[in-house]
Image (tube, rainbow, N blue to C red):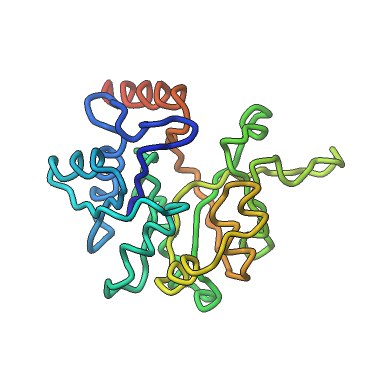
Amino acid sequence: MIPARYAATRFPGKLMQDLNGKTVIRRTYESTVKTELFDDVFVVTDSQVIYDEIKTHGGKVILSKTNHECGSDRIAEAVKDMDIDIVVNVQGDEPFTSRTSLEKVLKVFYGSDAHQIDLASLMTPLYGKEDIENPNHVKVIVNQNNFALYFSRSPIPYHRDRDVDVTYYRHIGIYAFRKQAILDFHQLPMLMLEASEKIECIRYLEYGKNIKMVESEAMGVGIDTPEDLEKAKRILNEEEKK
């Protein structure tokens, strides 16, 4: 499921922006289908414009209600009556979604601690002060078994003792849920921490759900700002030259 909202706060209409001849949302959809990992891939949106864009190019798309707080709520509505076990949420602004990353996040449901996992997601190391302090890059800290402890737009952990070697991780917006976990999420009200940070996966932690994090070096560009869009264009231009 690829939740797709037209009215993004930081970059309105970003999913319909041109990215080297195709819209951002179309590139994300096609990249996800291309992995060949899924029985079905859908865009789920409240926007007629995005609905028409995917439909016109032969994709599968569901028109959802408009009054959803976040992508997980939108997905919960869409999958409620579907006969499924695991549902993957790929953010609509991640046009470089790769098979490698998705395979890693799905693999945890076959591991020794699979019974403890409500959902899984990806993280990638962050390098450089600018990226670490960028509030558009959601950071995550984990325990020794790679279960998430907290997510924040602030740099976490706070590096008080400079003698301690710290690796910062950015949360990548790809999730794999057990169906029941996302249905539970939809029924639970937003609490203070999620409302403050505007990070939906915090809701799972606040209600005691277990999020398994998987490290991945595969990293494209999430389209959060006009600058990100230009960076994505440069990456595609370089790939086309190869």
Vertical position of residue 112 compared to residue 214: above or below: below
Q: Residue at (24%, 42%) from the top-left corner?
A: 48
Comparing 16 with 35, the one in front is 16
Q: Residue at x 18, y 41 (%)?
A: 52
Q: Which residue ends up furthest to the front in the rendered image? A: 67
Give the percent coordinates (x, y) of residue 128.
65, 29
Q: Which of 216 and 199 is in front in this view?
A: 199
Residue 101: % across, % down? 41, 51
x and y, in percent, of residue 144 in the image:
68, 63
Q: Where is residue 6 in the image (x, y as percent from the top left)?
A: 35, 38
Q: Is residue 216 above or below residue 117?
A: above
Q: In what quadrant of the picture does the C terminus appear? A: top left
In the figure, is residue 148 to the left or right of 18? Answer: right
For the point 65% across and 27% down, the residue is 130
Is 43 above or below relative to 76?
above
Residue 193: quadrant of the picture: bottom right
Position above or below: 182 against 9: below
Relative to 43, 191 lies left or right: right
Number of callouts in the render? Answer: 0
The foreground one among 47 and 151 is 47
- Residue 190: quarter of image: bottom right
Q: Is residue 155 left or right of residue 51?
A: right
At 50% from the left and 43% from the top, the residue drawn is 217
Q: Check the image and name the residue furthest to the bottom.
A: 115
Q: In which quarter of the image is the N terminus?
A: bottom left
